[in-house]
Amino acid sequence: MTGLPKFEISHIGIYVFDMKKMVDFYTRVLGYTVTDGGAFGKGAMTFMSRDARDHHQIALGTGRPEGSPSTINQISFRVDGLPALRQARQKLIDEGVTNLDPAHHGNAWSVYFPDPEGNRLEFFTDTPWYVAQPRREFLDFDLSDDEIHARTKASIENDESYASFADWRDKISADMEPVG
């Protein structure tokens, strides 16, 4: 036990090549609002949020070395259910975002996609089940929600780690330091 006070992830910072292009993507495509910005050192910063509780949830800063690859594995955004995941996917398609990568992990349904500078982002929603990770299978959005539920469950229910997500959360919370 660490004795830390309750904390949560608040915001991320990303070094960028092209501030204007990245601000356009995060505001127009993902719906963030610019909350502040300006010169900072030899570069510039732009702060954005989708929640007025947070001055910023994303901070973009110039200074990413030209030609450098992204070092971000993924930045994930939770949505509330398969209909919302479908809506987010459709928004990406409508905006011309390419290289969409739909997947299910047994415990989540996801759509991975790149931002304009190749950072991998994810919209996801939890399934009702737990299964040991890592796990990845194709998610077919041509199926109905009921078919997605049935196929996902069928693909994981014989795994020895399979459980309800609620039961898994109860079990794992016993191993975590209390917060509050």
Image (cartoon, rainbow, N blue to C red):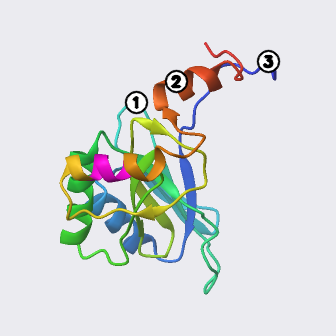
Q: Nearer the viewer, mark 1 or mark 2?
A: 2
- Amino acid type of the residue tagged 3 in the rendering: Gly
Amino acid at the residue labelled 2:
Asp
User: What stretch of residues is rendered in magenta?
Assistant: 148-152
- Say above or below: 96 vs 137: below
Q: Which mark is residue 167?
A: 2
Q: How far separated are the C-alphas under marks 2 and 3?
A: 26 Å
Residue hosting label 3: 3
Q: Please, what is the dominant secondary structure of the magenta stretch?
A: helix
Q: Position of residue 33 (x, y in %)?
A: 32, 50
Q: Earlier in the sequence, mark 1 or mark 3?
A: 3
Please name the amino acid that badge 1 sits on: Arg
Assess disc 3: are there few (<14), some (14-19) or many (≥20) residues with their C-alpha within 10 Å of its C-alpha.
Answer: few
Up-down: is 7 above or below 131? above
Residue under pointer 1? 53
The residues tagged by marks 1 and 3 sit, at their Cα atoms, a distance apart of 26 Å
